[in-house]
Amino acid sequence: MEQADDPSVTLLVEKHAEYIRNLDKEKDTFEFVATEHLRMSGVYWGITAMALLDRLHEMDKEGILKFVKGCQHPSGGFGGNVGHDPHLLFTLSAVQILAIYDQLDTLDIDSVANYVSSLQQADGSFFGDEWGEVDTRFTYCAFSCLSLLGCLDRVDVTKGNGFVASCANFDGGFGATPGDESHAGQIFTAVGALHLGGGLSHVDRDLLGWWLCERQVKTGGLNGRPEKLPDVCYSWWVLSSLSMIDRLSWITGDKLKEFILSCQDPDNGGISDRPDDMADVFHTFFGIAGLSLLGYPGLKGIDPVYALPTETVRRLGLVK
C-alpha cells in the first residue's frame, strides 16, 4: 500500500465522504432503525464532518432542510425525528444544521427562543424537555442555541453560570449535576456553557487542564475518566475543552493524531471508537473534529465552543 493511502498516516477523505453520503441509503438495517430517535443529531454530525472535509456540497441540502423543518414542534422546539417530542439536544442540532446552511432566517426565532427559555429552572439549570431531567448538557444546549440565534438575553445567564459552577469538583472537572463524577463529555458542556455565558472565572484552568491532559493514555488516545479505555469521541470533548482554557498544548498532539487515524475503516470509510471496531457517524465526526483542532492539513477549522465550522461562526459574527 502506498503511504499516501495508508490509513495509519493519512486521513481517508474520499472514503469518509462516501461513507457519510451513503448513511441514509440502507434504511432497512438494524442500525438505521435503532438510531431513529436521534436522527437530527446524526444529520448534524454528518453534515458538519462533510463541511470540515470541504464536501458539504455533496449532501442533499434540500432534503436535509425539509427533514429539519419537519421535526419542529408547535412549541418551537425540535425532536430527534419527525413526530418525536421536542428536546433541547435536538433543538440545538437543528439550529446548528440551519446555521451551517445559512438558513437561520427561515426560523421563527421567537418561537424557538421561547421554547428554550421555558425550560430554565429557578436554580438556573435547564430541563432537557418537559419531563424534567437536569444536566449540564442542557445548559450548554440552551446557551449555544440562544447565542446562535442572538437571543441569549432571554434566559438568566448568571443563574445558569451559577448552576454549572455548582457542578465543579475538587479535581477541577465537572459532573452532570452537583456531586456527580467528573467526566470529559460533561466538562465540554460545562466549560462551553461558561464560555458562552462569560463565566470562565469559575474554572480553575490549570487544575482542569491537568485533569484533561491526564486523559491521554499510552496509545495516544484520550479517555473520558481515569482508568477507562481511550475513545475517539474524547478527541473532541477533551481537545475542545483544553482549547477553551488555552491549554491545548498540554497533550501530545502527534500521538493523538496517530490514534484517530488508526481507528479509520480503510475499506468502507468512517471512524470507530477504537481500532478495528465498527465505524459510526458519531465517532467519524468527532474524530475529524479532533483532527481539525489539531490542525490536520486540508481540514477546515472548527470552533471549539459552538462545534461548528469556524467559517459558520465567523459569518454569524460570533468569533471572539
Image: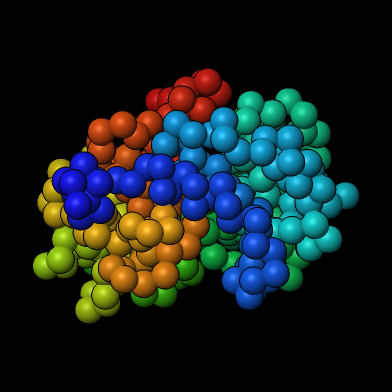
- Direction from residue 301 to residue 135 in the image, left or right: right
Single out the residue that lies furthest toward the right. Answer: 74
Q: Position of residue 74 (x, y in %)?
A: 88, 49
- Residue at the image position 24 percent from the left and 60 percent from the top: 262
- Residue at the image position 70 percent from the left and 59 percent from the top: 80
Would residue 38 be visible to someone looking at this image?
A: yes
Q: Quadrant of the C terminus?
A: top left
Would residue 114 be visible to someone looking at this image?
A: no
Q: Position of residue 188 (x, y in %)?
A: 39, 54
Q: Position of residue 305 (x, y in %)?
A: 42, 41
**How many numbered callouts?**
0
Residue 116, relative to residue 82: is it above or below? above
- Residue at the image position 41 percent from the left and 55 percent from the top: 269
Residue 139, relative to residue 170: is it above or below? above
Residue 277, relative to residue 196: is it above or below? below
Q: Position of residue 22 (x, y in %)?
A: 58, 52
- Residue 106 sits in quarter: top right
- Residue 304 sits in quarter: top left
Front residue of 282/279: it is: 279
- Residue 181 sits in quarter: bottom left
